[in-house]
Image (tube, rainbow, N blue to C red):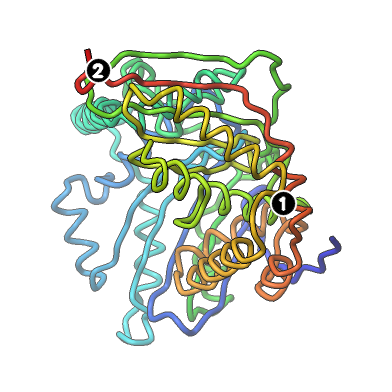
Amino acid sequence: MKRKEKVNPIMKLAEGVNLHLIKDKKFKTIRLLVRFREPLSSHTLAKRVIISNLWETSNATYPSNKAFSRRLSEMYGATFSTSVEKKGRQHFLSIHMNIVNPKFLQRETLKDAIEFIHQAIFNPYVTDGAFDVEVFEREQSNLIHYLEAMNEDKPYYAGRQLSQLYFEDKTQALAGVSSVELLQAETPQSVYDYYQEMLKTNAIDVIVSGDVEEQEVSALFQEFDFENRENKAEIFYSQPEVSKVKEKTENKEVAQSILQLAFSHSVPYGSDNYLALQLMNGLLGGFAHSKLFVNVREKASLAYSASSSFDSFTGVFVIAIGIDAKNYDEALSLTMEQVKAMQEGDFTQQELEDTKLMLKSGYLMSKDSQANLVEQAFIKSMLPEAFLEEQEFLSAVENTTKEDIVKVAQGLILQARYFMRGQLNEEE
């Protein structure tokens, strides 16, 4: 598929530091994203998660939550948040900020917002050459309690167990939010020392969306004075297939059992078969008319929930169903029958048309979200040859054939199976 891209102009703030501008007058807000990215590593993952929390709560200019929040209020209810995310071989640490368009207020809210981001990045709350101990330990404790609570969420826990089974690379198996053990090992000094290195070495993308002027935005971010660094762009992860399915069963004192299956697939983001993968997922378990939902959950009443999802940056396709433990064999068998049906092209033209309609509708709805548009711009900057503009996307969906979808389905190879056996309702 040949694609002629109209990539938004990229302004270099430094080597490896790019500013992207999305001029759009339909939104009444301006959205800013500053994203630090580097190869995923167990040595830095917890540090980055802690930095995310430290950024979001205080800095040397606004050392308390109260002062931090008051300054945002002064910017007419501006929002400031951070996030961490694992995508393929890379880890993202991001700052998100949203402000009212200054043209509606006749105030310099854009300048104030960018200065606020500058303070967060370059003026952290430091005492005695390290992150402030009291603030650090508070945020470290909050994160540990959060992950401990997340591990009590059974679907999340099952997903983590499946990842550890599936991925040969144990770093790749880690969650983007790190782990309790990794967080506990960090200190104010270890994270601060890494932070100084991160500012110098991470690739950085700055994206600004809204009714703004290129010259003004560029001038304000030039003041950040970033150093040159390498642009580490490798993102896709893949691993050799295993011949024997890896299995794990755990007994838990819960009412509902969880079965999760991990298949490998060889369809990276933006490849010629990428939309066929999306449609195949929709037909198998992604939508309410899918085979898993209709046949396993509704008709056979073997599942409380049944769905599928995929990651096109790591090559994994996951089926997750919530069942009664006594129905394990029957539910597993019927689930695998749905996969086989997809591989044999056992779906109707009407089901395919319904799936195409839902995929296109979801895409068009995403165009009304400024946050989604910013994320699309980021992916487009990283993988310009793989990105489809609106009309190209809609046309490509419409032109995807049944044969394309069957071909992708036939590439699914079961690699791992995790079963959480709930014992509370298990019959004697």
Decide which of 158, 209 is in the foreground and name it: 158
Which of the two discs, 2 and 1, labels the residue nearer the N terminus?
Answer: 1
Q: Give coordinates of residue 174: x percent, y percent.
A: 48, 25
Q: In which quarter of the image is the C terminus?
A: top left
Name the image quarter holding residue 96: bottom left
Q: Is mark 2 on a helix, strand or loop?
A: loop
**Residue kind at label 1, given as amino acid type:** Ile
Q: Can residue 201 be seen in this view?
A: no
- Say above or below: 359 vs 106: above
- Say above or below: 295 vs 168: below
**Residue kind at label 2, given as amino acid type:** Gln
The residue pinned by badge 1 equals: 405
Tell me which residue sits at (61%, 44%) in the image.
203
Tell me which residue sits at (84%, 60%) in the image.
1
User: Which disc is residue 177 wearing?
Assistant: none
Decide which of 273, 357 is in the foreground and name it: 357
- Say above or below: 412 vs 148: below
Mark 2 crowd level (few <14, some 14–19, many ≥20, 10 Å Cα): some
Considering every residue shown, the one lying at the far right of the view is: 2
Relative to 64, 157 lies left or right:
right
Q: Give coordinates of residue 107: x percent, y percent.
A: 32, 81
Q: Is residue 355 visible?
A: yes
Cα gap from disc 2 to disc 1, whole angstroms: 39 Å
The residue pinned by badge 2 equals: 423
